[in-house]
Amino acid sequence: MIELIQKIQTRLTAEASLFTEAGLPTISYIDKYRGQPTSTEVYTTPAMFIESKTTWKKDGRAYNGNRQINFHVVTEADLGHSGGSPTLQEKFASETYYNIIRRVLDDLDTEDSGKLKRLEEKSADTQLINYQIISYECIYADPLIAGLDYVEVAADESRILQIEKLGLR
């Protein structure tokens, strides 16, 4: 997960012009999701909180994972301070913001995972804030196994990530 967060930060930095050209700030805070949007924890916005779930399947001696990652993207600290409902201009700015975030996340990959593929998106409306949850999935290799010298990791678009001991196939 650390590698994914680092990769997201790198891509956000590389794509910062997309935000500035639209007159929008870049993500200023990234962390693992622990219920921050609905808590009183202090963080700067815009913020991204990452939640993941991995379903493992044993394939021979290796484990292949299917990981679902939810990106909780908070653009405003508190809608109540704006004096009511967002204006049409604010709604367009929010949609533009989420479009840029999707562009940054789409097809992102790491050494341990395949490309992120978008699953769904939904609003999370709390009494404190309204924010978006953008969900992706990817194939995932057990990093403890994948990092060993005698293990080969192979991935492509048509099959699940497979980890095989060399010479066994």
Image (tube, rainbow, N blue to C red):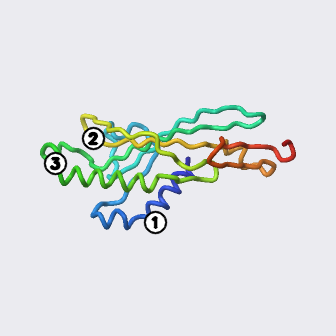
In the displayed structure image, the side of residue 26 where residue 32 appears, left or right:
right
Camera-nearest residue between 112 and 59:
59
Q: Secondary structure at mark 2?
A: strand
x%, y% of residue 7?
A: 53, 57
Q: Which residue is mark 2?
A: 130
Q: Is residue 39 above or below residue 96?
A: above
Camera-nearest residue between 117 and 25:
117
x%, y% of residue 63?
A: 70, 36
x%, y% of residue 55?
A: 59, 32
Quarter of the view holding residue 72 = top left
Q: Which tag is nearer the camera, tag 3 or tag 1?
A: 1
Quarter of the view holding residue 34 = top left
Residue type (three-letter) at the residue carrying disc 1: Ala
Residue at 32 percent across and 66 percent down: it is 20
Q: Secondary structure at mark 3?
A: helix
Q: Secondary structure at mark 1?
A: helix
In terms of sequence position, does the residue under pointer 1 or pointer 2 come before the other? 1
Residue 14 has which mark? 1
Quadrant where the C terminus is found in the figure:
top right
x%, y% of residue 82?
A: 16, 48
C-beta proximity under 8 Å, tags 3 and 1: no
Q: Residue furthest left?
A: 83
Give the crowd class for mark 1: few <14, some 14-19, many >=20 residues within 10 Å.
few
In the displayed structure image, the side of residue 154 where residue 10 appears, left or right:
left
Residue at 36 percent across and 53 percent down: it is 99
In the displayed structure image, the side of residue 169 where residue 106 appears, left or right:
left
Residue type (three-letter) at the residue carrying disc 2: Asn
Give the crowd class for mark 2: few <14, some 14-19, many >=20 residues within 10 Å.
some
Q: Which residue is mark 3?
A: 82
Residue type (three-letter) at the residue carrying disc 3: Ser
Residue at 71 percent across and 42 percent down: it is 162
